[in-house]
Image (spheres, grey):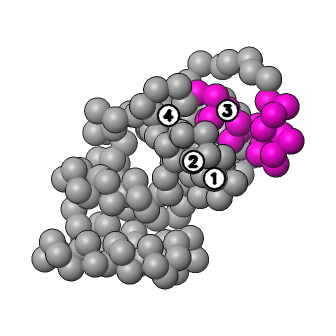
Amino acid sequence: MHTFLLDTISFGKLIKLNFPSLLNCFNKNKICITHPVLDEIMHHFGQKGREFSKHFTLLPLRDFDYSEYFKLGLDYADASLLEYQIGDEIIISEDHPLIAYATFHRKRAIQLIDFLLFCSKMGVIDNKTLYRCNHELRKMKNITKKKHKEVKQYLAGTNY
């Protein structure tokens, strides 16, 4: 079982995708959120966010010095994900500054579509669901044409 740390924007994208088959991704992997991420979820998504967040593990509250992250333009929720990533955990984020910071500091961060591609390769979701998610994320302008094409090429090789 893999452990993933989910950010608020990716959480919102999952709500918008609203594919029941994506629940397998949550059941077969440990998906975690931090208290600052939950606070943002409640602010942006209200009761729907609270209900959907029950599928994820809420990590214990930690006290960290976030000043370094703030200077770099990262918010409290993003900083909390970086602070919780101490082992093999992978951050799922749509926030390019967060991904860049993680990459620079040799931490692992991927976009939501990469997580869904991983789940498809592991047999957790079917390729039809990946195709639909890829299409919807491109419509939302959440992924680049290049990434959209990469996923389509992967799917073409699987005879979905």
Name the spot of residue 62 as percent of width and height, x first: 68, 18
**Discs 1, 2 touching: Cβ within 8 Å:** yes
Q: Which residue is mark 1?
A: 100
Q: Which residue is mark 2?
A: 103
Q: Kindly report the distance in space between the C-alpha atoms of the residues bearing marks 4 and 2.
A: 20 Å
In this picture, is 131 found above or below 96? below
Q: Which mark is residue 132?
A: none
Q: Which mark is residue 80?
A: 3
* Tag 3: amino acid: Ser
The earlier-in-sequence mark between 3 and 4 is: 4
In this picture, is 51 found above or below 97? above
Quarter of the rendering containing residue 121: bottom left
* Tag 4: amino acid: Cys
Q: Kindly report the distance in space between the C-alpha atoms of the residues bearing marks 1 and 2.
A: 5 Å
Q: Secondary structure at mark 3?
A: helix
Which stretch did the figure color magenta? 66-84
Q: Which mark is residue 32?
A: 4
Q: Residue at x 34, y 35 (%)?
A: 2
Rate crowding at label 3 as few (under 14), some (14 to 19) or many (20 or more) other CA atoms within 10 Å: many
* Tag 1: amino acid: Ala
Which marked residue is nearer to the observer: mark 4 or mark 2?
Answer: 2
Q: Considering the image in quadrants, where does the C terminus appear?
A: bottom left
Q: Residue at x 29, y 52 (%)?
A: 119
In the image shown, does 89 or 127 lie closer to the viewer?
Answer: 89
Q: Residue at x 43, y 62 (%)?
A: 113
Name the spot of residue 19 as percent of width and height, x first: 38, 61
